[in-house]
Amino acid sequence: MRANRIEEGIMSDPKNLVQGVMEEIDRCTEVAKRYHELGAPGAFGYAAITGTVERAKAAVGRGDIEELLQVLADLKSVE
């Protein structure tokens, strides 16, 4: 229920959407660092996360709301 309220708030204002994506970029960057520290066992996870982060940064630069919504979902799935 809480996640729905957050997503509703983010989708209602493009500025909030960008803010949400930026917060997830920061979180995922920290997660990627942990994968990188694992060395070879974490290489695939590191590459996947950094690729998603780069897509998210590009989407923020373009301001494409549909793409921002997609990358936000992708970023939120990172563990």
Image (cartoon, helix red, strand yellow):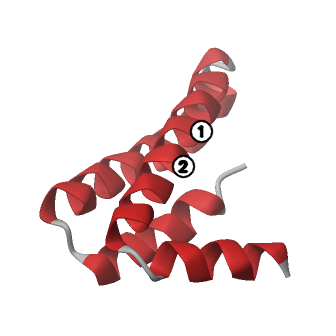
- Which residue is tagged 1? 27
- Which residue is tagged 2? 24
**Left or right of 33 on screen, residue 52:** left
* Contact (Cβ within 8 Å) of mark 2 with mark 1: yes
At x 73% / y 49%, what residue is drawn?
Answer: 79
Residue 64 x/y as whole percent: 22, 75
**Left or right of 6 on screen, residue 44:** left
Q: List the single residue furthest toward the right.
A: 1
Query: What is the number of the mark on residue 76?
Result: none
Secondary structure type for disc 2: helix
10 Å crowding of disc 2: few (<14), some (14-19), many (20+)? many
10 Å crowding of disc 1: few (<14), some (14-19), many (20+)? some
Residue 19 x/y as whole percent: 43, 53
**Left or right of 37 on screen, residue 14:** left
- Of 3 and 58, the residue lying toward us: 3
At x 71% / y 79%, what residue is drawn?
Answer: 5
> As shown in the figure, which amino acid type bears the numbered disc 2?
Glu
> As shown in the figure, which amino acid type bears the numbered disc 1?
Arg
The count of marks equals 2
At x 85% / y 82%, what residue is drawn?
Answer: 1
Residue 16 x/y as whole percent: 44, 63
Q: Quadrant of residue 40?
A: top right
**Left or right of 33 on screen, residue 53:** left
Q: CA distance from mark 2 to mark 1?
A: 5 Å
Residue 76 x/y as whole percent: 63, 61
At x 59% / y 28%, what residue is drawn?
Answer: 30
Residue 51 lies, with reference to residue 15, above or below; the image says: above
Secondary structure type for disc 1: helix
Residue 24 lies, with reference to residue 76, above or below; the image says: above
Q: List the single residue furthest toward the left.
A: 62
- Of 41 and 49, the residue lying toward us: 49
